[in-house]
Image (tube, helix red, strand yellow):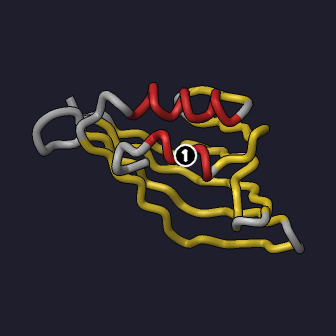
Amino acid sequence: MDDHRFDDLVALFTGDATATTPGGTARGREAVIAQTTRNHADYAHFQHLITTVLIDLDGDRAVVRANLVATFVRDGSLPELAIGGLLRLQAQRIREGWQLANLEILPLWRHAPG
């Protein structure tokens, strides 16, 4: 996503995936990709830093918790927006690897210099 390769997100999500982020809630792979594209495409640069990843693996399913800092730059080199929060994911194993069934971002802080 940080490389503006939104069409590649098809391989990342299950068909019935859901996403709840500061940009809204979407249900279904196409809706999740459309929401992601709508909320990110106008930014020249954005970066999602994910740290302290904790994975609870249960066979072909996994629950993931991590810290997230997302920074958005529209033009120039100074960020227009930065958001910090918790990232919660539910993943399932498929023949080709893993896909996300649920993505949730719980914002903890937001900084919009201006």
> Relative to the observer, which residue lies in front, 78 or 12?
12
Measured along the vertical axis of the image, is residue 47 above or below residue 51? above
Residue ranking furthest to the front: 95
88 up-or-down from 96: above or below: above
**Relative to residue 46, is residue 93 drawn left or right?**
right
Tell whether 40 sits left or right of 9: left
The percent coordinates of residue 71 (x first, y second) are 33, 47
Which kind of residue does numbered mark 1 sit on? Leu
Give the percent coordinates (x, y) of residue 99: 70, 56
Residue 57 placement: quadrant: bottom right
Specify whether 20 is left or right of 4: right
* Residue that extends furthest to the right in the rendered view of this protein: 59
Which residue is identified by label 1? 9
Q: Residue at x 64, y 27 (%)?
A: 31
Task: Provide residue 101's location: percent of width, then percent of height.
Answer: 75, 48
Question: Please, is residue 95 above or below residue 83 in the view?
Answer: below
Furthest residue to the left?
Answer: 76
What is the number of callouts on the image?
1
Relative horizontal placement of residue 23, taking residue 32 as reference (left or right): left
Please tell me which residue is depicted at 54% across the width and 61% down the height of the picture: 67
Identify the residue at image location x=67%, y=47%: 13
Which residue shows up at 50% across the image and 68% down it? Answer: 51
Badge 1: how crowded within 10 Å, few (<14), some, or many (20+)? some
Name the element at disc 1.
helix
Image quarter for residue 90?
Answer: bottom right
Q: Nearer the viewer, residue 6 or 103?
A: 6
Of the 4 image quadrants, the one containing the C terminus is top left
